Image: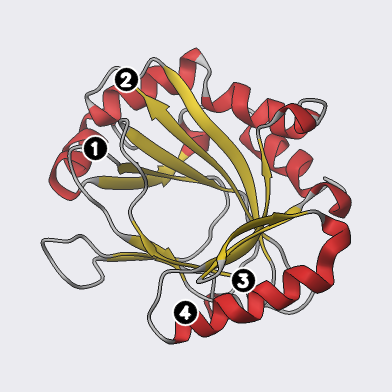
Amino acid sequence: MLNPDYLHERFKVDGYVNFDLRLFVPGIPELAEGISCIEEGRWSFIIKNDQGEYDLPPGERDEAERHHLIADQDRERGGFAFSFRWIPDTHENCDLEALQQAKQVLGSACVMDLLRAVTGRRPSGVSQCYLSWFEPGHFLGTHCDPGQSFGVALNLTKDWDPNFGGVTLLVPEHEGAVSSCLVPAPYQLLVFDTSVRRIPHLVSKVSAPAGRKRLAAIARYRS
């Protein structure tokens, strides 16, 4: 079994670490199942292109597709862009049980104690939480998450083929090349620095068959 001390050493050296959260926290498969069952109509389109950033409701798929095509062109030209679906932790989504369960788990005493051991920091709580869903064609360009302390991405994707894309690539600034290539795997928690170190990362374009879901729960922590 992985030791938190070992994970802490990897975090100090690399600025990030990836491990199976089930080894430390119960109930993660049940959480994943609940999120996979969220109805399609709750997922909005979050898109950034050179015209701006847009959070479009599910009913505006045509407008979302228009902005997605612009974002994809920006990506091909090397600009920062993204296009995927999400459910943010907002007042409008406070009734969504699966989202609130994800926020509760990622902010629970068990997880907070684990993250203190892994990062060596003392987070005071979750500052942002959202669920992400990448469909075919979706991507997230190379970026560094904003400061505070650190962030996590809990992968909730089952039976993902690397040929489907949607791979997380980490490119630490001091190395200038990809240091890790993380294929979506269920219940893996990626913990990455957002303050002391800059850890540029991206999600490659998804080419999975229709109906396949690349799902994750994302949280950022304040100290």
What separation in Å lies between label 4 and label 2 (alpha carbons)?
Answer: 33 Å
Q: Which mark is residue 195?
A: 1
- Is mark 2 in CB contact (under 8 Å) with mark 1? yes
* Label 1 environment density (alpha carbons within 10 Å; few <14, some 14–19, many ≥20): some
- Above or below 139: residue 13: above
Q: Callout 4, which amino acid?
A: Arg
Q: Is residue 168 visible?
A: no
Q: Secondary structure at mark 2?
A: loop
* Residue 119 image point, x, y percent: 26, 30
Q: Please tell me which of labels 1 and 3 falls first in the chain.
A: 3
Q: CA distance from mark 2 to mark 3?
A: 32 Å
The secondary structure type at the circle numbered 3 is: loop
Q: What residue appears at the point 88 percent right and 59 percent down from the top-left corner?
A: 59
Residue matched to label 4: 75
Which quadrant would residue 100 be assigned to in this image?
A: top right
Are the residues tagged 4 and 2 within 8 Å (C-beta)? no
Crowding near pointer 2: few (<14 within 10 Å), some, many (20+)?
few
Residue under pointer 3:
138
Q: Residue at x 69, y 42 (%)?
A: 32
Q: CA distance from mark 2 to mark 1?
A: 10 Å
Q: Which residue is mark 2?
A: 223
